Amino acid sequence: MRRLIIPVLFLALFASCLGYKELPVEYDYSYNGRFKKYRTFDLMEQANAYFDSTMYNPIIESSILTRMRFLGYRQTDRKPNLLISYKIFYDSLNFKGYEQPEIEQWVDRPSLTNEYDKKDISMTTGTLLIQLYDRKQEKLIWNGYATSLYGPIEYQNRRQLRNAVISILDKYRFFADGYMTPVVEEEDL
C-alpha cells in the first residue's frame, strides 16, 4: 500500500499543474512607484461596479486577495498604500504601453533609465487588466494585462479566470515591506 501512495501523490501533483496555463502577459510601471515600500492594499470600489460584470467579478477579486496576501500585503480599508482595480475587455483593443527594463532590474538600479518609450499593444478578444495605484501619490504605478493568443479567455470559467489573475500578478514580484525581514528576539542580541 505504501508503494502506491507516492506514485499516486506524484500523479495528483502533476495533474494539478496541467490545469494552469500561463497566459501571455505584458506589464508596465511608473518610475514613481515605491515598490519595496508598500505594506497594505485594498480593492478599489467602482461606482455601479456591481451592475457591470467587466468591473466586478468575485472570482477575480478572490484571486487578487489570495495573491496579495501570499506576498505579505495586509488588506485594509483605512488608508491602504495600494488600491487595486481590474477590468475585463471582451472585445479586442489597442493599448498604449511602454518599453521598459524588467521591473526588478529598474528597482535595483533606478539609474538604468527614466524614459518612457511608448509602444502600441494589440489585445485580442478577452483581456484582463489589473492596475495598482499608489493612494498617497494618487498615481497609477503598475499595469498588468493578459490575453490569450489562442482564443478568448472564457470569463465564466473559474480556472481560466484564476489562471489569468495568476499570470498577471506573477509579474508583480514584490513582497510587502517588512514581510521577509527576520524577526530578531531580544535573547538573540
Image (spheres, helix red, strand yellow):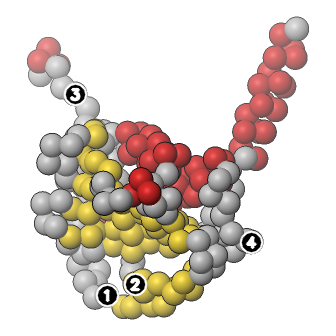
Q: Secondary structure at mark 1?
A: loop
Quick one: label 1 or label 4, which is nearer the N terminus? Answer: 1
Distance of label 1 from label 2 (alpha carbons):
6 Å
Residue type, mark 1 in image? Tyr
Mark 3 residue element:
loop
Q: What residue would you read off at disc 4?
A: 150
Residue, far top: 1
Q: Which residue is mark 1?
A: 116
**Does residue 96 lie above or below 108 as drawn?**
below
Tell me residue 50's x, y (percent): 41, 53
Sequence-first tag of 1 and 3: 1
The mark closer to the camera, 4 or 2, is 4
Residue 136: x and y in percent read 12, 60
The picture places residue 66, in percent across and down from the top left corner, at 45, 40
Mark 4 and mark 2 lie on one chain; the one further toward the N terminus is 2
The numbered dot on residue 98 is 2
| Along the viewing direction, whichever of 107 and 59 lies nearer the viewer | 59
The amino acid pointed to by label 4 is Tyr
